[in-house]
Image: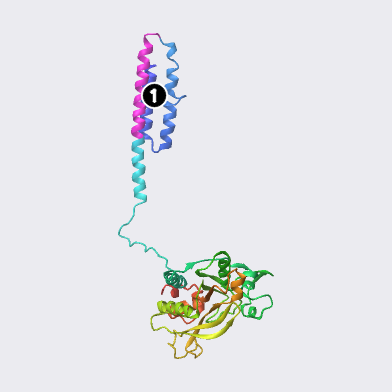
Amino acid sequence: MKEALEKIRQSAINALNEAEDSKILEEIRVKYLGKKGEITAILKQMGKLSAEERPKMGQLANKVRAEIEESLSNAQTKIKAKMREQSLKNERLDVTLPGKKVKQGQLHPLNIVMSEIEEVFMGMGFDIVEGPEVETDHYCFEALNMPKDHPARDTQDTFYIDENTVLRTQTSSVQIRTMEKTKPPIRIISPGRVYRSDTADATHTPIFHQIEGLVIDKGVTMSDLVGTLDMLMKRLYGEDCKIRLRPHHFPYTEPSAEVDIMCFNCGGKGCSMCKQEGFVELLGAGMVHPKVLEGCGIDPEVYSGFAFGLGLERLTMGRFNINDLRLLYDNDLRFLKQF
């Protein structure tokens, strides 16, 4: 039995010295030290020995086991170091190579101007309110004093989902929802996407963005509307910016006006963009119609207010001197990187 233990010790150590990977080490461990391994097989034969020989053989078997375990541990350390060295060699980096430039995103020009406008209005005490883009006929038209078959709907011919559901043509629907839920005083802007079946050209697209404003309180007048819009335009375009108001008709405001801004392409001299007029139509505005106030549960004898609707795309064109609205939607990085 002594010779057998010595043979097992030498055989195991030789095998461990020649092992090249962790899988082989595990196979050697199981072969010599496992529950059904060769050391265990020797120990099962201890019952055949005399009482005097058993302690000596037991000590020798434990010594052989300890030597094999130590050799196994050394072999594992050696193989791990070898694998780490090989991994470092395979994953080595050439630090002399130029680094890769990290591409950084940026805001779209529409988002830039939207943020500027929101900042101006928040500075004047306005809240920002949003609403659904898929709207009911009631909120999009009827509550704005445009019943079915009203001729004013023709200019806002849009995309219907069914007879009473439509993609909103303006964010005025958010104003109606706000007046129904909130008691005056009210001071809000409602930015968002709107939809109309316009043919795409230098100043029109079937999808665009509006920023509508609403102020309802006691004693609100037309001069408050003009002062608010004049301050906004001067903040966006500079103190030299000029606006003009032209009488107009909107079913939901009375009196109503079209608000123009001095053409940013020609500086008021007249060009193809402003159709030689020197001014570009920018937004519609006016005093909120008494019927609209009554429909939302607000007494027009006590409260008055003004409303306006800004076209974000046209404001952006003026802000960055862009002469074709379609450029904002072409997704041409050569154009967008300029901002």
Q: Is residue 180 left or right of residue 245?
A: right
Classify 202 as above or below 65: below
Instruction: Name the kind of residue labelled 1 in the image.
Output: Ile
Give whichever of 13, 229 is nearer the camera.
229
Give whichever of 289, 329 is nearer the camera.
289
Q: Is residue 10 left or right of residue 214?
A: left
Q: Bounds of the magenta span?
A: 50-75
Q: Residue at x 54, y 83 (%)?
A: 257
Residue 248 in the image: state x and y as whole percent: 56, 84
**Which of the image's four quarters has the C terminus?**
bottom left
**Which of the image's four quarters has the N terminus?**
top left
Instruction: Classify 10 Å Cα crowding around label 1: few (below 14), some (14-19), many (20 and above).
Output: some
**Helix, strand or loop: magenta stretch:** helix
| Quadrant hosting residue 256 | bottom right
35 in the magenta segment: no
Q: Which residue is mark 1?
A: 8
| Quadrant hosting residue 116 | bottom left
